[in-house]
Amino acid sequence: MLVAVLTYVGYGVLTLFGYLRDFMRQWKIEKCQNATEREEQKDFVPLYQDFENFYNRNLYMRIRDSWNRPICSVPGAKVDMMERVSHDYNWTFTYTGRVIKDIINMGSYNYLGFAQKTGPCQEAAAKVLSQYGAGVCSTRQEMGNLDKHEELEKLVARFLGVESAMAYGMGFATNSMNIPALVGKGCLILSDELNHASLVLGARLSGATIRIFKHNNMQSLEKLLKDAIVHGQPRTRRPWKKILILVEGIYSMEGSIVRLPEVIALKKKYKSYLYLDEAHSIGALGPSGRGVVDYFGLNPEDVDVMMGTFTKSFGAAGGYIGGKKELIDYLRTYSHSAAYATSMSPPVVEQIITSVKCIMGEDGTTIGRARVQQLAENTRYFRRRLKEMGFIIYGNEDSPVVPLMLYMPAKIGAFGREMLKRNIGVVVVGFPATPIIESRARFCLSAAHTKEMLDTVSLSSCLPSAHNIKNVYIPLKRKCMIISENFFFPAITIPVLV
Amino acid sequence: FESCLPSWVLTGAPAYHLILEGILILWIVRLLFSKTYKLQERSDLTLKEKEELIEEWQPEPLVPSVPKDHPALNYNIVSGPPTHIITVNGKECINFASFNFLGLLNNEKVKSAAQASLKKYGVGTCGPRGFYGTFDVHLELEERLAKFMRTEEAIIYSYGFATIASAIPAYSKRGDIVFVDEAACFAIQKGLQASRSNIKLFKHNDMADLERLLKEQETEDQKNPRKARVTRRFIVVEGLYMNTGDICPLPELIKLKYKYKVRIFLEESLSFGVLGEHGRGITEHFGINIDDIDLISANMENSLASIGGFCCGRSFIIDHQRLSGQGYCFSASLPPLLAAAAIEALNIMEDNPDIFQTLRTKCERIHKALQGISGLKVVGESFSPALHLQLEESCGSRENDVKLLKRVVDYCMNSGIALTQARYLEKEEKCLPPPSIRVVITVEQTEQELDKAASLLKEAAQSVLN
């Protein structure tokens, strides 16, 4: 409770200062440093409304150096970062030319450690690159369907345990281009509160009615399903053509895992269809790395549309959809991506083929299996350590995405900078990716992290002189004792404000 | 008793005043205790009836079944690289179907630059641009593109389709007005749909129609000047249209821009690396100051033979996309090897500016050679490297037209020229173009090959259409 109040106070102070600075900028007391419209176009309707950019100018600019950090090595467990400084409070950056070496990388989505510059995956990709070239220059339906793509799709279908699969060049586009092909007007989409932007965009572009259920809350979902079937479409009362439930395997900002057995039971009971987005969970969950379906030990045929991306656990780029043969045939014909978007680049396809074979154990080694187990161990160990130290951690025990709550706006910037000083790179997120008072730091664990690295990270997170975010209480919704050391909040805020 | 009544009662407030107030108080008490009516009707169905409804409801199948011989279902399988000589479905052919205009797909320098990047960075970037997914190659590519196009800044996307489809909704929101050409490609249509703005289509390349729409909008504005002051206006056109092969009249558009105060977004996927003396696109072709165009968007999948896309323009405009371009913020960044390939391709483009003239000469040659085929007409400018061959007379239904064109394409494929039909999603397009065969010209094709292709098409048209 106290923390919530202090967080609001923090944002309030920042907003006041923001208005003050805007006022000074308008009256030219302070120099205005953002880019402006052309002289010839000054009488056009302004492109941005002043208010839209308020957050950007006044809050985001102060801590802008925590994001978009440029790196110059492979994004593995340790990464090299280009040093950049700002002499005008983050309005512009200059690169000093120095490279900070060996930063422990807790921000890249490298769950199974396939982001490597040596090894069988890289060698296979290099061979295919020299044979095929980098691009394809055509769409799947025209002249861009290479034999490599066919090979990849058969392999992915086998890996997931489904009849057939289709691969696309971009994970985001997989959602935004295929959901409109599956549902349209007269259909209903039930989407989780915290779904990713690509799912939301795909649902909007489809033209179907969208209803939101509370995050991972099965009662809310059941109520919506019942109401939908009983009452039909809103004004005409016609029955819905189809109902599609959109859920994710692991939610990237919460670290929570979907309650798949219950969702499947509901889906069967109410005859709806399930679209599962396994962007983060494929490769990262389950005893054999086959995702959240494997983790719960369920039958992959129960999920109507299994979607996932190759960016996270496979160290490549792109997305896939797996399911029954009729579904995939339909997508081959009617998906926006198949008709209008260029197909995947051959070396990327080869990287995926090699890494999937490695995870399945078909390359003759047990590296894949070992990595999956290492990731699970790392997850358990790291979460236990952080909990012991008293941090508030969201999410499921087994999820390799670990959000650590910060709450205060001042801590967002401070945490990121202090960790960088200790050679650890973390990701901090605030509004608008998370609710305004629930900013957090997010750790993405990897099979490539060793125990020593995890120890270093957890110890550095709690050095009291750095940032005093040690809160020993359970999140705000439940009640418990509050022993928080937030007195230092003003001490951190004031240097950030000036 | 009299002492506890308020003084005005005693002094004599009129009786009707008191009675009225008494009635009002009684009315309020009644309203407070009466049953509330909810505006939404509550269902009066019993639990059993609800369960019956749930039992009875049958959804449609998730997807309708697709007939086995659907033309778009059976893909051509290309074994090996889709370069100048391409192996399609087992047959070796000369490639007239891939958008490899400058022949950089098989270029050794490009491949070795990509190999070097692969050795240094691996394949994937494992994160979006905001979270440790920004590599120095990305920054370098953005700088090089901005310098090449002579703009202040450039921003890269990892997928060509997503480039314009994310750029438009970042600026144009609900309530804004966008004037777009009828022949705009599907990516632009999706971007417009995502933006939820008012779309006004004008006839393809018809400036009079566009001016009419702009004038109508102006009269609307005069009725409501307050609203007009905050409604943004955009024109979205393509440099070289993919669906029709012709170019937009940019000088007239610039005039309209300043007259009616509309911003221009130019989509240059096909014209980047093709038009203009140095390949800078349609602005160089017409000799227009690049700052007059608010945003130029292009994909790197045609001339640059890589994957991805970019937008370039002034920092004032481009910087906004770094926080509000959906395909930029919420998606992983471009794999470094593809960015390195694009940089090398740019180097080659800058070092050999004569390839653009070579390409143009070849286009004109084949354009001339394809004239006069009975039954097929050539659609596209003479210097456009992506032409369409449409049927002169349709045979009634689109399905039959598609079948006829397929026979022409198969005839050519069997004789060693790889062609393809232009594929569209028939139900989704706003203005569906007629079925056509796509002919793509690249610098790698020799003059004999061009002549062979033209004569083969003549033969095919003869045998199939007559």
Image (cartoon, coloured by chain):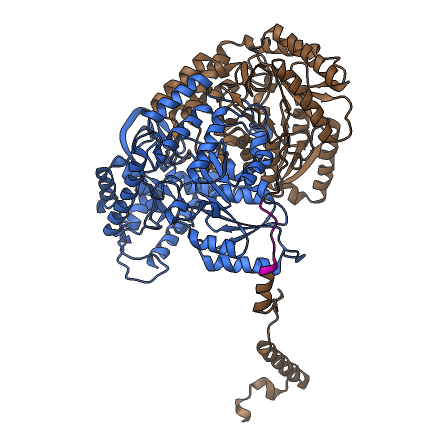
Chain colours: A blue, B brown
Residue A132 x, y percent position in the rendering: 46, 19
What residue is shown at x 62% (from left), y 57% (from top)?
A: A232
User: Which is nearer the eye, B309 or B410?
Assistant: B410
B21 horizontally vs A462: left or right: right
Q: Main secondary structure of the magenta part?
A: loop
Tell me the residue at 48%/10% (across/down). B351
Residue A446 image position (x, y, % from top left): 31, 38
Q: Position of residue A207 (x, y in %)?
A: 61, 45
In the image, is residue A383 part of the stretch drawn in magenta? no
Give the side of residue A53 with respect to residue A451, left or right: right
Give coordinates of residue A404: x percent, y percent.
32, 47
**Viewer-closest of A28 and A124:** A124
Q: Nearer the viewer, residue A326 or A373?
A: A326
Q: Is residue B103 left or right of residue A62?
A: right
For this orientation, the residue located farthest to the bottom is: B1
Name the image quarter holding the C terminus of chain B.
top right
Left or right side of B50 for A33: left
Residue that sits furthest to the top in the current view: B448
A127 over B324 or under it: above or below: above
Residue A190 sits above or below residue A351 on the image: below
Is residue B303 something one can see in this rendering?
yes
Q: Residue at 39% across / 20% down in the picture?
A: A126
Q: Which residues are magenta?
A: B55-62
Decide if residue B325 is in sight here: no
